[in-house]
Image (tube, rainbow, N blue to C red):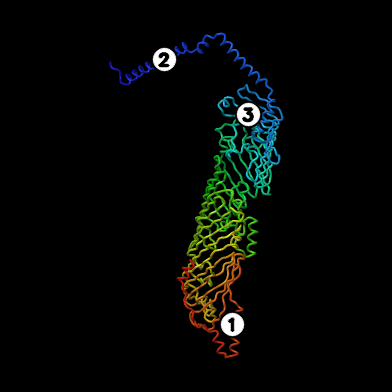
Amino acid sequence: MKLPDWKRARADAATRGGRLWASGRAHFDTGRGWVAANDPVWRAWRRPGRPEIISGAAAGVLVLAIVLFLALFEWNQLRGPIGRWASAKYERDISIDGDLDVTLFSWTPSVRVEDLRVGGPDWADEEDTLRVARFEGSARLTRLLAGDLQLTRAVVIAPDIVLIVHKDGRRSWVLDDTGPDEPTRLPLIERLLIRDGRVRVDERGRGLTLDAEIDARELAEGVGDEDERSGFRLEGDGALNGQPLTLRVLGQPFVQLRRDRPWRFRAELTGAGSELNARGQITRPFDLSHFTADLSLSGPDLANLYLITGVVAPNTPPYSLEGDLARDDSLWTFSAVTGQVGDSDLSGDISVDRVDNRLRVEADLRSRSLDLDDLLAVLGAPPDPTETASPEQRARASAMRAQARLLPDAPLRTERLRTMDGRLDFRADEVKRNALSVTAVSLGATLEDGILGLDPVAFSFAQGELNGTARIDATGEVPQSSVDFRLAGYPLEAVIPARDGQPTVTGRALGRVRLQGAGASIADFAARSRGTITVVVPQGQMREAFAELLGINVGRGLRLLLSGDERTTPIRCGVASFDVRDGVGTASTFIIDTDVVLAQGQGTLNLRTEQLDIRIDGESKKPRLLRVWSPVTISGPIRSPSVGVDEAAIAGQVGLIAAIGALVAPVAGVLGLIEPGLAEDANCGALISQAR
């Protein structure tokens, strides 16, 4: 009977396997026989003679002597050599002033050190970096032999830690500052106890000081991990830039910790008017380079966070934000951010990394509903005091209104801009109702080596848009800045108030501002700037009554105005161009050309004092009776200018006409009030071309 195919295949495989095993065993026996016959060492140990016996005995005695020496050795004799070696290596005083005891022969070798002192660097005002009354630690032998230090137990009694950061960034606790800046990674400690500890921090660059107590206790009987009577605790008070600071960190007990089991904590930090709360976990215990947390932060101004985090943020109204904080080596991310800044919502993602020993911040932020006042606060302008604002911002807004100032004078922190690089992308999909009719905003910013570039700066209006770029060079003590903004299609009726519910002027304005100069704030920059400011109205409509009054055509202008006549006359063109030098803009071109009047102006736009001083002379294109030749004046603060006429010119003209009538004839006096209407149309095409 034939076997099935699978049984036959299995039988063949078994036969081949047997043959291979027999062949391998034969080769092994042959090799072992050759070694036994030819290797002298093998022969000596198989049949040891007198020399081999003496050598083995000597080796055993040596090993036993070493074991006994280590077991009975007075380890305190090594305190001096260890201290001298460490002091020379790290260039600071390091010593063990108390007992040193080591237990080697155990599955968990241990060490006990009393009165350990690690001095500080020369620049640290003779402050010791570390003092410990007693340290006890034991390691797992099997892991130690594998090259992995894993402590089964550590007890630290009365540690006194002093952490000093110099203004130039040097840190007193870094023993070897020649290598790269690495996050703190401690070996795993399965059980950690700390008693009567103290931590002092002196961060001289930001004026930060902290004096805190630190303890780590085992789980108290009958309480949970969240109970403050157990686990890790660090609590202290200090100051931050002259303002009170408090820090509180609570964590799980350091008992039965494992690398694959995260350690949970919560932290609260209050200072510089800001409050931060975090609840998270260190992914691998004692490896501070990786952790995650839910973070919430609030305060009166995001710019204050620089003192806490070292990250430059703009001035803002009061804020409240929350999101997911994570650290992965040098990369920090604050993702899924949501919250409020002033009366605006804000969301997005922020990352902070250290590249070539410089912070680099990347931010992508969005607002679904933006309050324009909150954005203007970024430029240093205080928010509307009737809306969300801090007491300081309300006081600044009131002062600016009392002084009739428009340009913000909040200083730009140039020293902060030089500390980091970064990129910002911000977009507001919708803007709350505002006086300027802004409907959407898009901003982009880059910061590289102390030079801040804004591109784009884009505002969309209900009609028209503003686009431009700006550059701020903050590498010097006083920033050097330049701006180039273009306005397109902005409605005049949104600027010039209506009368009796009807617009006095309609049309689309074009404009361009090109300025450069030095200044530590927007107001300071404007006061020192040079460049050009131009506004062009290619065409539009004006109430005929007002057009007549541009030429002070008393008869017709007043009649139309008082009768409520709403007839309009075309604006052929309007051009106003100012040459700015040292913050004072002088009108090089100022023309308003309508079908009935050609008006030309002169004067100044003073950015130093934020004052206008403009005189407009009008010439009628048609004969008019009772025409008074007197300029229209626009003067006063830019924020709220006044429109009037030169009363002195009118009085002088009327007096002259009266004198002529008295000396010559009454008819001659009347002729002085007649306008022959000889003005011609302006060359609008050339004017607009030159202005652009």
Q: Of the numbered discs in the image, which one, if any, rests on residue 408?
A: none
Residue 197 appearing in the image: no
Residue drawn at point x = 61 percent, y = 81 percent: 651
Q: Which residue is mark 3?
A: 153
Q: CA distance from mark 3 to mark 2?
A: 50 Å
Which amino acid type is shown beneath numbered disc 3?
Arg
| Depth order, front residue of 29/307 | 29
> Upstream in the sequence, badge 3 or badge 2?
2
Is residue 480 visible from the viewing direction of this image? yes
Q: Amino acid at mark 2?
A: Arg
Callout in the foreground (3, 2): 2
Q: Which residue is under mark 1?
A: 653
Mark 2: few/some/many CA within 10 Å (<14, 14-19, 20+): few
Quadrant where the N terminus sits is top left
Residue 530 image offset from top left, x and y in percent: 56, 63
Q: Are marks 3 and 2 in contact (CB under 8 Å)?
A: no
The residues tagged by marks 2 and 1 sit, at their Cα atoms, a distance apart of 133 Å
Of badges 3 and 1, nearer the viewer stands: 1
Q: CA gap, disc 3 to disc 1? A: 102 Å
Q: Residue furthest left?
A: 1
Amino acid at dot 1: Gln
Quadrant of the rendered image containing residue 287? top right
**Closer to the camera in the image, 14 or 452:** 452
> Cβ–Cβ below 8 Å for labels 2 and 1?
no
- Number of the label disc, if any, that sits on residue 25: 2
